[in-house]
Image (cartoon, grey):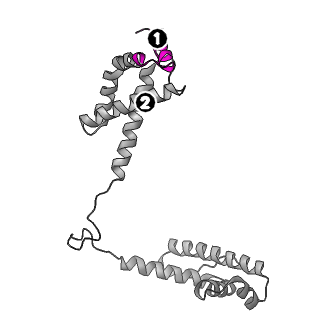
Amino acid sequence: MAAGAEADLLAAVRAGSGSAYAELYRRHVAAARGTARPLAPSPADAEDLVAEAFARILSLIRRGGGPDAALRPYLLVTVRNLAAAAGNRRRRLVLTADVDDESSPQLWEPFEDVALAEFERSAAAAAFRALPRRWRRVLWCVEVEGMPLPDVAQRFGISRNSAAALSYRARKGLREAYWQAEQEPPARHGHSTPRAA
């Protein structure tokens, strides 16, 4: 097949010729099927990939895009991309029993790792204890008591902006102390103090 003939057929398709696209289809459908078969779960799915690839390319060419000289490389890449997208959709589909159906058996049993939960509680407590007293007080006011920043500012005798900054630094310090407490053996929890700002 001469490259010029392929370019002429593509130009004719751009001009609206259906017979030119039919000729391109005839020339390349076997290669498209050969690419689609190993990528599709069934022969019908392979045929769907080929049909979708040809339809998308036709639409693209009619809009002025797509290949100018050779259809086959463009077609085979389109088939592969469609197969990959279809595979991703199939992997995301997870079938489960209807949760609202009381007659369906429970497929999983709730699990709580007691040791992990205790470790996380002790790491959080150690991280909180490791904070400077002022940070602990502001976190208690904001997070436990739910106190708004203007009230925190009044309680600490500082401006609202200073209260916001203090609250931010305390949260950041707690995150860092928690991370550090998680990295240490349990016996050493609470022995490291973050730098006060």
Most foreground residue, 147 or 6: 6
Dot 2 lies on which element?
helix
Dot 1 lies on which element?
helix
Point 48% across, 9% down: residue: 4
Asked if residue 127 is positioned above or below residue 44 in the image, the reply reads below
C-alpha separation, residue under disc 2 versus residue under disc 1: 19 Å
Most foreground residue, 167 or 191: 167
Amino acid beneath label 1: Ala
Point 73% across, 76% down: residue: 165
Q: What range of the chain is rendered magenta?
A: 1-20
Most foreground residue, 25 or 105: 25
The residue lying furthest to the bottom in this view is 155
Disc assigned to residue 3: 1
Residue on which disc 2 sits: 77
Image quadrant occupied by the N terminus: top left
Q: Are the two marked residues, 2 and 1, in contact with CB atoms closer than 8 angstroms?
A: no
Image location (x, y in percent) of residue 26: 34, 18
Question: Is residue 197 at all visible to an observer of this figure?
Answer: no
Q: Main secondary structure of the magenta part?
A: helix
Mark 2 and mark 1 lie on one chain; the one further toward the N terminus is 1
Disc assigned to residue 191: none
